[in-house]
């Protein structure tokens, strides 16, 4: 192999590749500690770890670029679709502009799997559009100001505050109750089309994660599980990270989303944000006075199958999907 020649390879996560990935991260971002801290959880402990693929660009035995694909399965109108989310895409400065990203993304897509990208930086999003990625609509956050006067006071005085779960106390009339584990009967929900999230995945994503904390609520009708809601606190802001519901209950997702807004207020939150492709979720949020200011995580897709047509608004894909929430 000649000096300064870029070569490409695809490998699963392993302790051997980890050391090279950490050096790449350090060259790109300056400090790899946050990535090192989440490596075992994100790659080795993932329920489908053996299916994760790191697509790497190498020069002089050092990684100069990488993009990762985390596998997901999607249900759509009775069909099962194999897909994956792009994550951890990075290229060292000295090799940018040499087509490295284009080649890495070509490698990732060559088996025909549906490629999903969310939380993409503006520069990377521009590259993806040039190589054939198509926008997914709707793809904007919805938000509500729960305490506008406090926000104004904060801007005027510079005073900072935070929200804690200590401020939240369930009331007897609440339809949803806090839990500290994933319900084992979560797979019994007759959920709308979207990404399949079983108990193993949800436990990995929201319970075992070492660097984020989530609040999980469930609704039951007698003993039957009706819905599950996941919230995350960020300063004075609360995110609706995930919501899963049984489509046979006609008052869902409205009941769970109304509870989410009420819970955020009880926590003392100033603002609440949500992101979803589901028209059911977005319509309910609109009725709850959430507004759309056009902020987008640039959700897009690529697939070599010319016959694949999906109505994304009929699918329940939430903010917690992909890596945007846990980075």
Image: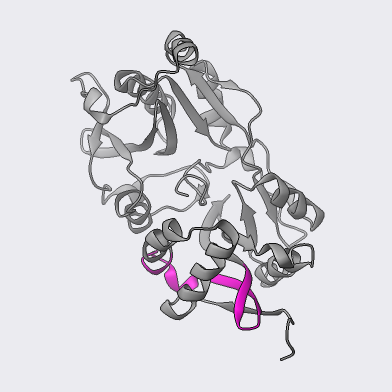
Location of residue 136 (image quadrant)? top right
Is residue 293 positioned above or below 225 on the image? above
Residue 26 seen in this snapshot: yes
| Front one among 155 and 191 | 155
Q: Residue at x 52, y 62 (%)?
A: 70
Q: Position of residue 267 (x, y in %)?
A: 30, 23
Q: Residue at x 42, y 59 (%)?
A: 33
Instruction: Identify the image's colour scheme: rainbow, by chain, secondary structure or one colour.
Output: one colour
Asked if the stretch drawn in magenta spans residue 137, the answer is no
Name the quadrant containing residue 59: bottom right
Q: Which residues are magenta?
A: 43-65
Residue 319: x percent and y percent? 50, 41
Residue 102, by quadrant, is bottom right
Residue 247 appears anywhere in the view: no
Q: Residue at x 49, y 11 (%)?
A: 156
Taking 83 as reference, is 168 left or right?
Answer: left
Position in image of residue 147 (x %, y %): 42, 13
Q: Is residue 9 above or below residue 223?
A: below
Q: Residue furthest right?
A: 130
The residue closer to the viewer here, 192 or 281, is 281
Q: Position of residue 151 (x, y in %)?
A: 46, 15
Q: Residue at x 40, y 18 (%)?
A: 159
Residue 205 horizontal side relative to residue 127, left or right: left
């Amino acid at each position: 192999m000649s000096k300064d020649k870029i070569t490409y390879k695809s490998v699963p996560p392993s302790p051997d590749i980890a050391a090279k990935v950490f050096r790449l991260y350090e060259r790109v971002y300056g400090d790899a500690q946050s990535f090192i801290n989440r490596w075992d959880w994100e790659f080795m402990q993932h329920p489908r770890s053996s299916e994760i693929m790191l697509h790497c660009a190498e020069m002089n035995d050092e990684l100069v670029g990488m993009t990762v694909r985390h596998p997901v399965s999607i249900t759509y109108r009775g069909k099962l679709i194999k897909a994956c989310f792009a994550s951890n895409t990075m290229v060292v400065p000295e090799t940018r502009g040499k087509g490295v990203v284009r080649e890495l993304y070509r490698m990732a897509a060559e088996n025909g799997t549906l490629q999903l990208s969310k939380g993409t930086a503006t520069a990377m999003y521009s590259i993806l559009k040039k190589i054939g990625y198509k926008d997914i609509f709707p793809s904007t956050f919805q938000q509500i100001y729960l305490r506008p006067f406090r926000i104004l006071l904060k801007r005027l005085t510079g005073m900072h505050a935070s929200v804690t779960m200590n401020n939240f106390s369930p009331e007897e009339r609440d339809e949803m109750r806090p839990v500290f584990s994933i319900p084992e009967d979560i797979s019994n929900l007759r959920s709308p089309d979207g990404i399949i999230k079983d108990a193993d995945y949800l436990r990995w994503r929201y319970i075992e994660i070492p660097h984020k904390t989530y609040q999980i609520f469930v609704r039951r009708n007698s003993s039957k599980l009706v819905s599950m809601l996941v919230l995350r606190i960020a300063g004075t802001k609360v995110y609706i990270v995930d919501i899963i519901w049984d489509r046979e209950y006609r008052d869902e997702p409205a009941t769970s989303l109304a509870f989410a807004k009420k819970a955020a207020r009880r926590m003392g939150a100033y603002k609440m944000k949500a992101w979803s492709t589901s028209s059911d979720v977005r319509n309910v949020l609109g009725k709850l006075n959430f507004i759309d200011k056009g902020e987008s995580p640039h959700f897009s897709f690529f697939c070599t199958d010319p016959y694949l047509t999906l109505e994304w608004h009929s699918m329940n894909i939430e903010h917690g999907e992909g890596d945007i929430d846990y980075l």
